[in-house]
């Protein structure tokens, strides 16, 4: 199926005819970027930071334990992970123009279903729909769109789209808390069903285009046959920044899975997903056990998102200029420090540094860790490659809440899991340090614009 991607034959029509490139005062990629950011924001119903606010009132209504609720969440996340590679293949073949409205419709139905849940079985089904369509499919569609429409500005464009996700983390916990307090958790889910339906289905149908080549354009709106302009990223002689694999050199999923670099990169996103999900899912009770008030714990989610938002564009700027492996190494060190801070927390106000390091790690995760797959392995099969990588990432996130719940239920303390979460990122940091950009063809070691690694 990889070999049948429509991108393989996608060429700008004016280039085929030998005509001068079409002049566009406005590059449609910016519209796609706005839709991608909105999509990331409205993936919230399936994200941990949103579900975490519903946890206590839903547990009370359904009479569930921490472990029962966490197991339902974990099982649903595993279902999402198993479906994601298949969704990635469909995305490469059909594109976002078809999958975005279909996925948004499914997520709206899933949110309404959550409002009607009365049993543990219903919770398993509802979580499976939310995680598969929200955290899984919508997020994958969003970054796929950015990857198709941008290349040289991919790091910054991904960071801008990531503002939607960061703003979601910053605002959704407060919105959820307000909805649940004033209208109940059932009406909260109905609100999200209506919001997703209104904001994503129609733009997906009428505005989304899959690739710039469909409109006779090129990524970034720049014709590669014209003389390159030095836009600050690099020069025509030396391009100092990350290696970007061209479409022609794109890897298949089978080739990627045989590449050691893939597994080194994977260690970073799985560690971030497992540890980050575990912390966020239990953040209110985790911080409460260290004397942090309930309102403070919710505010720390927003402060973390504010930090991630402020640092998002600098992270994207750095992503376009420096090797990804160094940036990912730094993110793992920050994640380890965040866990150490909460483990020894000498005073309540120090929790601010915990939130800051998580926010910094999140900004890197939404920029560098997102574009590294398409930069290393190419555009043609990016949905399939990301689908495989993200399925493993989601599996890791499924496990994240469990060790935290087990630590509390069996040891009566969060300290054992915090020690574990402090050590895991150090191993990932050691692995990614040597994750050099791979070469599909051994002879292709140098190009006219030699990347500096």
Image (cartoon, rainbow, N blue to C red):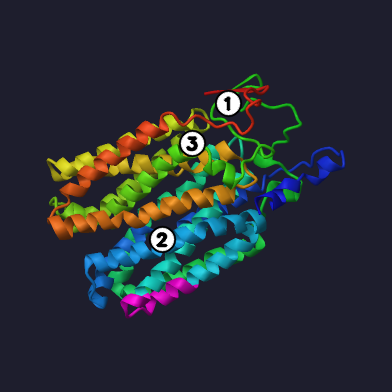
Residue in front for this viewpoint, 256 or 64? 256
Secondary structure at badge 3 equals helix
Residue beneath disc 1:
232
Q: 65 left or right of 378?
A: left
Residue beneath disc 2:
78
- Whichever of callouts 2 and 1 sits on the residue coming sooner in the sequence is 2
Q: Nearer the viewer, mark 1 or mark 3?
A: 3
Residue segment shown in magenta: 109-122
Asked whether 120 falls inside the magenta stretch, the response is yes
Q: Where is residue 56 in the image (x, y as percent from the top left)?
A: 24, 67
Please tell me how crowded label 1 is: few (under 14), some (14-19), or many (20+) other residues with Cα within 10 Å: few
Q: Quadrant of residue 209?
A: bottom right
Secondary structure at badge 1 equals loop
Which residue shows up at 54% across the image and 70% down it?
105
Residue beneath disc 3:
260
| Figure quadrant of the N terminus | bottom right
- Most common SS among magenta residues: helix
Task: Report how far apart the C-alphas of labels 3 and 2 lie in the structure.
Answer: 24 Å
Q: Quadrant of residue 366?
A: top left
Q: Position of residue 43 (x, y in %)?
A: 46, 59
Please tell me how crowded label 3 is: few (under 14), some (14-19), or many (20+) other residues with Cα within 10 Å: few
Q: Can residue 10 be seen in this view?
A: no
179 w.r.t. 378: above or below = below
Q: Which of marks 2 and 1 is in front?
A: 2
Asked whether 131 falls inside the magenta stretch, the response is no
Work out which residue is located at the far top of the displayed protein and give it: 237
- Whichever of callouts 1 and 3 sits on the residue coming sooner in the sequence is 1
Q: Where is residue 235 in the image (x, y as percent from the top left)?
A: 63, 22
């Amino acid at each position: 199926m990889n070999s049948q991607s429509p991108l393989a034959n996608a060429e700008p029509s004016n280039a085929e005819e030998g005509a001068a490139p079409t002049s566009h005062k406005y590059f449609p990629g910016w519209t796609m970027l706005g839709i991608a950011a909105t999509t990331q924001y409205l993936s919230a119903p399936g994200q941990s930071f949103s579900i975490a606010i519903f946890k206590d009132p839903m547990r009370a209504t359904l009479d569930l334990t921490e472990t029962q609720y966490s197991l339902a969440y974990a099982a649903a996340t595993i279902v999402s992970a198993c479906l994601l590679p298949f969704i990635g293949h469909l995305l490469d073949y059909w594109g976002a123009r078809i999958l975005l409205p279909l996925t948004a419709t499914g997520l709206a139905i899933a949110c309404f279903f959550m409002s009607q849940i009365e049993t543990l079985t219903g919770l398993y089904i509802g979580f499976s729909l939310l995680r598969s369509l929200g955290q899984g499919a919508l997020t994958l569609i969003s970054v796929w769109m950015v990857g198709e429409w941008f290349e040289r500005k991919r790091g910054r464009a991904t960071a801008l789209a990531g503002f939607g996700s960061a703003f979601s983390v910053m605002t959704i916990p407060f919105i959820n808390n307000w909805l649940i307090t004033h209208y109940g958790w059932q009406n909260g889910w109905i609100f999200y069903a209506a919001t997703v339906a209104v904001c994503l289905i129609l733009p997906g149908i009428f505005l989304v285009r899959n690739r710039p080549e469909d409109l006779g354009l090129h990524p970034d709106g720049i014709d590669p046959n014209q003389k390159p302009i030095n836009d600050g990223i690099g020069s025509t002689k030396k391009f100092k920044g990350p290696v970007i694999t061209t479409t022609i050199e794109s890897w298949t999923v089978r080739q990627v899975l045989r590449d050691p670099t893939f597994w080194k990169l994977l260690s970073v996103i799985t560690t971030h997903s497992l540890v980050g999900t575990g912390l966020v899912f239990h953040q209110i009770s985790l911080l409460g056990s260290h004397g942090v008030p309930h309102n403070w714990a919710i505010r720390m989610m927003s402060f973390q998102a504010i930090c991630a938002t402020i640092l998002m564009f600098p992270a994207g700027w750095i992503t376009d200029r420096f090797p990804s492996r160094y940036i990912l190494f730094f993110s793992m060190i920050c994640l380890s420090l965040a866990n150490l801070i909460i483990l020894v927390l000498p005073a309540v106000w120090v929790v601010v540094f915990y939130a800051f390091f998580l926010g910094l790690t999140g900004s890197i995760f939404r920029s560098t860790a997102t574009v590294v797959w398409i930069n290393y392995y190419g555009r043609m099969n990016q949905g399939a490659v990301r689908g495989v990588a993200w399925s493993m990432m989601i599996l890791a996130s499924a496990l994240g809440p469990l060790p935290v719940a087990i630590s509390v239920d069996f040891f009566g303390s969060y300290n054992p899991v915090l020690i574990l979460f402090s050590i895991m990122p150090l191993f990932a940091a050691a692995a990614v340090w040597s994750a050099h950009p791979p070469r599909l063809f051994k002879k292709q070691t140098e190009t006219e614009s030699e990347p500096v690694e």
